[in-house]
C-alpha cells in the first residue's frame, strides 16, 4: 500500500482496516460516497453487535467489489468531511434509539481523503434506527449484520436481539472497583506498537484516560471514568487483583496422572504475556522431536510428541473463551501419555456435542468479544470457530492420534485432550528425542535451516515481520524472533529498513550484501 497521511486515532492500523488483516470482513463495510441512510443502518447493526464480535468499521470514500476494497480510493471532497462528521453526530442523536455516537476520523490515502467510522459494540443494546431519513419517515427497525450485509432483524433474530437488552459481555463492562490509573501506559504503548496502531507514537505521552478512550477500554462521563474489564485483563500488571484465578497452571506428572510426583508452574499477568510465557515454557520443556533413522533410506522420519500448533490453539482458545467471573484457572496437565487443557465453563449450549467432537462446532456468539479482538490483533487467534479444526489438522499432520473434546451436559467445563504420538513412547535404538527450544537457537543445524528459510523468504524484497511469519508459516512471535529474525540480524545477513525506529509499524527487513552472497545472489 502506498504512503498514507492521516489523523486516524484508532486502536488498529489503517492498513488493517483497508486490508482486512486482524478484522473479519463481516466487520468491515466500504462506501464509495456518503450515503447517510445506509451508513445509519450499518452503524445501528454494528452497535447491536449481534454475534459479540466487537462492532465494526465503515470506510467512506472507498468503493468495493465482492466485499473487498478497490484501491486507490475514490476519495471524498475534503471540504465536505467536516459537514459529514456533523451530520453523523446529529444522526446519533435523532435517528438511533438509544442515542449512539461512533468515532470517526479523516485520513489521506494515495492523495485521496477518506473517512473511517469506528463503531464499537454498544453498551445499551438493542438499538433501532429510522428506516428512512425522509421527512415522512417515522418507522424504526432493528438492524444486524448477516455475514457482510446489513439487514433488518426479523422473526427469531429480532426476538433474540431484544433478549440481549442491556446485556454487555463481561469483558466489555466497566469495572467500578478499579480506576483508570490501574491501566499501565507502558503496556498500552507496547501493545499499540506491536499491532502497528497509529496511536503508538503518542500513547506513551498521553494520560491513561485519553489513550484508554481511544482504545475503547475506558468509558463513562468525565466525572465518573472507569476502565473496562478487557483493559484490566490486558493492561494491568496483575489482573488477579480484580479477577482471581486469572492464570495458567502447567502441571507435569512424570509417572502419569495417578502418580505421586508432579511439578507445577503458574503463569499470571496481562493475558497476552501470560499466554505467551506459558506456551514458551511448555515448548521449551515438554515438546520433543523424535528423529527415526531407517536403514533402507537416507531420510530420517521426524515427528513430535505433541505438535506445538495444536497446543497453541488449545491454550489460546481456553484463554479466549473461559469465564473471568469463575474463579478457576486454565490448567494444562501433561503426562507421558497426553496433554490436557481444561477451562471453565464449557462451550455455548447452541453447539451440539456431536459437532464438538467431530470438529464442526460453530458458535453463534462469543463470550469475550473484546478479549478475542485483542488476541486477533496480536495474531494469537483467528476467531471464527477455527480452533478445533486447526487442532485436528495439526494432530493429523504430525501423525498423532485424534484429539478429544469433552464437556458435560451442564457445560460447566471444557477439556481438550491431545494424545502423545505413539512413537514418542518408544525412544530407543535408532530413535533420538530432541527438545526444540532448550536455548533460543535450537542447534547449529536447526538454526542454519531457520535462517536459510528466512533469507529465501526475503529474496524478492523487503517484508514486514507479519509478512515474514505468514510466508514462513509461523504464528508464534517469540519462536520467529529467537530462531529466525535475531540470529540473521546478529550475523548481518539481514537489516531493518528503518534502523533508527526499530518499533515502527512500517518496519521491514531486507537482505544485506552478505545475505545475498550467502544465497549465491551476488
Image (cartoon, rainbow, N blue to C red):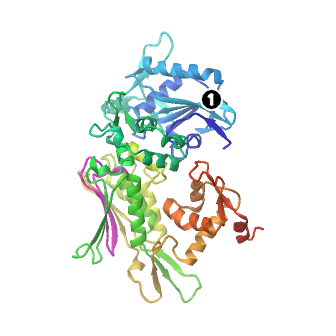
- Quadrant of the image containing the C terminus: bottom right
How would you rate the neighbour count of disc 1 (Cα within 10 Å): few for under 14, some for 14-19, many for 20 or more?
A: some
Quadrant hosting residue 5: top right
Q: Quadrant of the N terminus?
A: top right
- Total numbered badges shown on the rendered structure: 1
In this view, which residue lies farthest toward the front? 205
Question: Is 330 within the magenta?
Answer: yes
Residue 476 visible in the displayed image: no
Image x and y of residue 443, in percent: 53, 77
Residue 250 in percent (x, y) is at 32, 65
Q: Nearer the viewer, residue 85 or 364?
A: 85
Give the camera-side residue of 95 and 134: 95
Q: Is residue 339 visible?
A: yes
Q: Is residue 274 above or below residue 348?
A: below
- x and y, in percent, of residue 83 in the image: 57, 19
- Residue found at the far right of this picture: 522
In this view of the protein, which residue sits in the foreground, 66 or 330?
Answer: 330
Check residue 328 for magenta coloring.
yes
State the image coordinates of residue 255 (x, y, percent, origin top left). Answer: 27, 78
User: In this rendering, is residue 169 above or below 252?
Assistant: above
- The residue sitting at 31% across, 73% down in the picture is 335
Q: Is residue 122 left or right of residue 18?
A: left
- Front residue (pair 392, 273): 273
To which quarter of the image does residue 169 belong? top left
Q: Is residue 396 above or below residue 228?
A: below
Magenta segment boundaries in residue numbering:
320-346
| Residue 93 falls in image quadrant | top left
Q: Is residue 121 left or right of residue 242?
A: right
Residue assigned mark 1: 32
Q: Secondary structure at mark 1?
A: loop
Amino acid at each position: 500500500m502506498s504512503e498514507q497521511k492521516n489523523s486516524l486515532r484508532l486502536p488498529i492500523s489503517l492498513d488493517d482496516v483497508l486490508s482486512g488483516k486482524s478484522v473479519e470482513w463481516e466487520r468491515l463495510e466500504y462506501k464509495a460516497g456518503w450515503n447517510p441512510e445506509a451508513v445509519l443502518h450499518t452503524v445501528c447493526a454494528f452497535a447491536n453487535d449481534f454475534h459479540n464480535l466487537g462492532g465494526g468499521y465503515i470506510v467512506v470514500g472507498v468503493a468495493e467489489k465482492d466485499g473487498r476494497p478497490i484501491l486507490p480510493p475514490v476519495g471524498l471532497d475534503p471540504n465536505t468531511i467536516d459537514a459529514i462528521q456533523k451530520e453523523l453526530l446529529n444522526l446519533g442523536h435523532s435517528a438511533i434509539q438509544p442515542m449512539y455516537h461512533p468515532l470517526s476520523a479523516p485520513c489521506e490515502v494515495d492523495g485521496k481523503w477518506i473517512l473511517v467510522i469506528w463503531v464499537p459494540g454498544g453498551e445499551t443494546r438493542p438499538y433501532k434506527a429510522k428506516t428512512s431519513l425522509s421527512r415522512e419517515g417515522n418507522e424504526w427497525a432493528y438492524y444486524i449484520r448477516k455475514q457482510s450485509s446489513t439487514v433488518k432483524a426479523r422473526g427469531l433474530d429480532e426476538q433474540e436481539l431484544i433478549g440481549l437488552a442491556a446485556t454487555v459481555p463481561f469483558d466489555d463492562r466497566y469495572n467500578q472497583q478499579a480506576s483508570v490509573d490501574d491501566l499501565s501506559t507502558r503496556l498500552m504503548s507496547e501493545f499499540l506498537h506491536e499491532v502497528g496502531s497509529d496511536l503508538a507514537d503518542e500513547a506513551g505521552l498521553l494520560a491513561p484516560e485519553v489513550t484508554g478512550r481511544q482504545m475503547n477500554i475506558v468509558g463513562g462521563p468525565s466525572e465518573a471514568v472507569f476502565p473496562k474489564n478487557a483493559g484490566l485483563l490486558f493492561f494491568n500488571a496483575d489482573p488477579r487483583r480484580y479477577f482471581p484465578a486469572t492464570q495458567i497452571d502447567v502441571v507435569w506428572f512424570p509417572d502419569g496422572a495417578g502418580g505421586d510426583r508432579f511439578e507445577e508452574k503458574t503463569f499470571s499477568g496481562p493475558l497476552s504475556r501470560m499466554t505467551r510465557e506459558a506456551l514458551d515454557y511448555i515448548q521449551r520443556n515438554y515438546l520433543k522431536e523424535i528423529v527415526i533413522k531407517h536403514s533402507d533410506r537416507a531420510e530420517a522420519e521426524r515427528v513430535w510428541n505433541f505438535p506445538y500448533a495444536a497446543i497453541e490453539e488449545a491454550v489460546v482458545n481456553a484463554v479466549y473463551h473461559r469465564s473471568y467471573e469463575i474463579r478457576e484457572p486454565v490448567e494444562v496437565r501433561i503426562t507421558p501419555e497426553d496433554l490436557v487443557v481444561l477451562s471453565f465453563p464449557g462451550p455455548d449450549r447452541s453447539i451440539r456435542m456431536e459437532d464438538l467432537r467431530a470438529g464442526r462446532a460453530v458458535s453463534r456468539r462469543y463470550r469475550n468479544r473484546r478479549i478475542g479482538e485483542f488476541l486477533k490483533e496480536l495474531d494469537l487467534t483467528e476467531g471464527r470457530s477455527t480452533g478445533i479444526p486447526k487442532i485436528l489438522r495439526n494432530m493429523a499432520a504430525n501423525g498423532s492420534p485424534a484429539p478429544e473434546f469433552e464437556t458435560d451436559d451442564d457445560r460447566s467445563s471444557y477439556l481438550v485432550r491431545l494424545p502423545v504420538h505413539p512413537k514418542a513412547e518408544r525412544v530407543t535404538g535408532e530413535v533420538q528425542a530432541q527438545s526444540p527450544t532448550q536455548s533460543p537457537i535450537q542447534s547449529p543445524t536447526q538454526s542454519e535451516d531457520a535462517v536459510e528459510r528466512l533469507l529465501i523468504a526475503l529474496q524478492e524484497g523487503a517484508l514486514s515481520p507479519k509478512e515474514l511469519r505468514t510466508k514462513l508459516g509461523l504464528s508464534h512471535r517469540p519462536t520467529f524472533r529467537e530462531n529466525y529474525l535475531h540470529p540473521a540480524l546478529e550475523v548481518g545477513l539481514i537489516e531493518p529498513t528503518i534502523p533508527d525506529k526499530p518499533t515502527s509499524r512500517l518496519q521491514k527487513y531486507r537482505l544485506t550484501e552478505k545475505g545475498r552472497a550467502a544465497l549465491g545472489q551476488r
